[in-house]
Amino acid sequence: MKISLNWLSKYISIKKSPEEISELLTMAGLEVSSLKKGNSFDGVLIGEVKECTKHPNADKLSLCKVDIGADEELPIVCGAPNVRAGMKVPVATVGTVLPEDFKIKKAKIRGEESRGMICSEKELQISDSHEGIMVLPDEWKIGTPFSDLYDTSDTLIELDLTPNRPDALSHIGVARDLSAILNLDLQKPSFKLDESKVDASSEYSVEIEDKVGCPRFAIRIIKNVKIDKSPEWLSKSLRAIGIRSINNIVDASNYVLMELGHPIHTFDMDKLSGNKIIIRSSIKDEKVVTLDGIKHKLPEDTVLVCDEEKPVGIGGIMGLQNSEVSDDTINLLIECAYFDPGKIRKSSKKLGLYTEASKRFERGCDPNDIEFVLDRVCSVILETAGGELSKGIIDIYPSIIDKVKIRLRQKSVNSVIGMEVSETTVKEILNRLEYEIRSEKDDNYELLVPSFRPDVEREIDVIEEVARIVGYDKIPPSEHALIPLSSSPNNNESQNIKLKNMLVGFGFSEIYTNSLMPYKLWKLSGDSDEPVRVTNPISMDMECLRSSLMPRMLEAVSYNFNRQRKSVKLFEDGIVITPDKKSETGVEEIHKVAAIIAGELSSGNWIGENSSADYFFLKGVVEAYLKAIGFSTVTFTESSNNSYHNRYDIIDNGSKLGFMGEISQPVLKEFDLEVGVFYFELEVSLLLKEMKKDISFLEPSKYPSIMRDLSFIIDDSMQSEKLTAIFEGTNTDLLKSFKISSVYKGSPLKENEKSITYHLIFSSNERTLEESEIDKICEGIINVASDSLNANLRV
Amino acid sequence: MTLPDNDNLRKEFDSDLENSIDLLSIEELRIKYLGRKGIIASLMESMKDLPDNEKPVFGKSVNELKKYFNTNYESALKKANSEKQSDSSPDFDNTLPGVEISLGKKHPLTQVWEEMLDIFTRMGFEVARGPEVETEYYNFTALNFPENHPARDMQDTLYITDDTMLRTHTSPVQIRTMLSTTPPVRVIVPGRVYRNEAISARSYCVFNQIEGLYIDKGISLADLKGTLISFAKQLLGSNVKTRFRASYFPFTEPSAEMDVSCIICEGKGCRVCKHTGWLELLGSGMVDPNVLRNVGYDPEVYSGFAWGLGIERTTMMRYGIKDIRYFYDGDLRFLEQF
Ligand SMILES: [Zn+2]
């Protein structure tokens, strides 16, 4: 909503700067999003373009000769497409300083002299329009200072209003809030209205069929008006808030709309058939052409304003072309009504038609100010277009919408706000905001809420009114300490942070990726189900919800490789979503953590070789990660998915923690990636569960341990786990740990052989071990390996 | 009888030893005399060709030599090591970089969230989380969004079905939490939320919110201010100024937006704060009695406040980041700066 401070001053006299007024409004909930102060435009004069020819050296420029009432015509080079000879224009003469310190100088533009500038509205900061130069009325006198004719001293405030405040979509509404904040009187517009002797009701009648959609509908009739240009005060007022002047009738209803906030529609009475207005619901497939010349197929149940033959307006949204006021209109039928907010909203949404009228009706207009609004608009029309006003209002209002009654307790005011607000202050505020205090006893007030405030329905709503007018800044912040609740706070969260810290320690950087993606990208996750889809996506690129973190992470890998990164290690922690008919929301949401790695493991070290990421590096990360979390018996089982090569499920005690693998070539190709990319994904809830388990502590041994290395030669095709199983199977508690320390192939081994070396550590908590007893255990292992696997010790 | 030429070997060793002044030459010394193919090893090797009766004497002699080499080598090594620590040798180039060890980085949004979590944990708030796909009831109805009301337009919704959607805010978790808890309630709720908005420098269809809720007996606007001012000062520094202005949210009444003094210009006015000196930090308000009633709390007994903020916006404000897309590109050049 745009508010002109000059206009506002008609209703309230404030001795404060525009900045102070903005601040007051913002603090009270009418947020000022911009403030444009007036400008005197010294040096900008009215000029007339006498000649206009093409610039010899530039296609888009024109050479103009402009008369500004001086001895000679000024040569000006102009780039606007709309400049023509004969136009009246604002000319910034040499030496003028336009807004934003733009100083006009004598110049040569592509070889042609230019002394001054013809200005656009944007250059004068009148509007954002930069389409072309500003064209002024023909009768404006050459050489007059622009500011003499064009009021530029006004300040424009733009309000970013919340949807609960339809009343503030008007100058009077904003003035009312200010009158409460500053405790000043509000002057409502006053006017006299002369009626003719003809009874309106003898000429016309109104019938409401759709009483739900239209609870109230009223008309007045003015005859013999003269359509003309609006007087300067009227067009100036509208111009100040960015509305173009059309003619005295259209301008009058726009003016009253912006003054009082209640939309009005004027019909050319002679274009209406019969002498009755009927308000009904639209039927199926009804088609109409609105004022802007656009054809609409109406959704069913749209409120229609009709004459005795045809629809003439979409109620509360827009009038139709067939009954529009035009230059030869003589008799007017003026409508002011109250439409059901929900119905207007539905229709305007379905039609995709958002107008100044629908904006107000869908938020809720005042059903009880209709007589005043109609009288007001008639007074403006009579003043600017003459004519005779028929006597009386034809007003159909079958069931009166009562003002809301609220009981307000002084005690509640104080307890919600958290400080004492005096009774006098409460009453003053409520009076200024036009609440009617019906009665008062024992600190309780019986209130009637003004009907222009549909959002105020309960005691708490009134308390908010008091609080915002008093000012939130007046409320002293409480300083009593909050005492923690008894339960254990944020255990999962701190464990989740640890999960991330570990990956950071492994050198992975965290990313956040978009959980919405195109189907094509989703498909790369290799999941067999269908994705969960958004039914109204922003674009098809945001249609599917991620069921795996992989596709977007792979995209991030490629993003970095495309920017000359040679080493990429990333992780993400987030929710993946898959269909699940049984759940409340139809989906299953799983919290995952995933990591991805590609390229060099460290880039550009001067010591030693740089190795590249591979499967076993990632497996090492997975093993170290899970071990650090607390898992000790993780196993890997082959699993298949087209998007991966060497994909293994990660299992602990029968429960699947996640999986790891190498991204398959076809998927990498989608991103033109030429390096191996390795990925794992784990389910966070399972990791957190493990982290919460108690640690059982083992006393470290006081005695020295004994180490042995055993190398076995086995068939190349045999998996190491078979050999490993033998170590696991030893029935001694002296073997504390073992691991594979090397795998060897080649001479002097045979072609189809490999040797695997295990590093063993033996110790006891009770005594120093004898070499001979360890030899014996090793012998046992060697025998089992030889017997069951035909694995021979390599000596 | 064949014996090793101990005297000459000792002399040779002594003269080599004299020249062994740094670790490298000492290592060369070790290899020459004590290495696998060194002089001692070759003497031992040559022993196996001797007649058996000569072997013990020869062996003894080699051992003496070995002992001599060893003792002198070790003391030279010790000396060189201690010299190295006290005085670098001239060929040691400390200007070379260390072996590159890279730690990863947590995402800036995670870092800011963890900071907020820390602040609110100290104030006694617990964390609650909820689903990203929500029902109409939790996302709107229970939160007092009237049907067919422009308030629902404040949040452009992405629908999954007619009555399920991607949550437009973390507020549904307020409802879920209150339904499963008896007051007092003190929670913060982090999470992803979704809006039907085209991606640009200033908006993204996915972003992260933190929501807070505090319900108890006798909670007032003064408590809301106290808590949130304390939060702002802990997050942005004790010099930060705050202001509360009236606003509107369907699920709070009265509602307030909290501004903090612009951290770029410290309130003097700049482009970032649109010359107002203020930046919006969060939306807040007293929980609407309808919301309390919807979860079975008696609004005459209990009251409380709620607030919410966008982590992206706060992070952008804090570091002067002008494009929200940086958070979602996964660009390491961006992420590694935090
Ligand atoms: Zn600033």
Image (cartoon, rainbow, N blue to C red):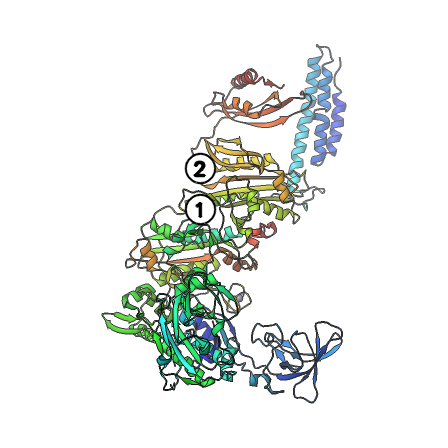
Where residue A612 sits in the image (x, y, percent)? Answer: 64, 38
User: Which residue position is annotated with label 2?
Assistant: A690
Query: Residue at 47% of width from left, 36% of height from top?
Result: A630
Above or below A696: residue A4: below
Total number of numbered labels? Answer: 2
Q: The residue under label 1 is which amino acid type?
A: Glu
Q: Is residue A609 left or right of residue B334?
A: right
Instruction: List x then y, in percent, for residue B2.
Output: 75, 14
The one nearer the camera, B268 or A247, is: A247
Left or right: where A447 falls relative to A154: left
Left or right of A233 on screen, residue B305: left
SS state under label 1:
helix
| Residues at marks 2 and 1 touching, judged by CB atoms closer than 8 Å | no
Amino acid type, label 2? Glu
Q: Which mark, by number, is residue A493?
A: 1
The chain carrying label 1 is: A
Same-subunit check for callouts 2 and 1: yes
Q: Would you place residue A403 above or below residue A756 in this image?
A: below
**Whole-number angstrom distance, CA of label 2 to CA of label 1:** 14 Å
Residue A744 image point, x, y percent: 64, 25
Residue A212 position in % (x across, y down): 35, 65
Q: Quadrant of residue B139?
A: bottom left
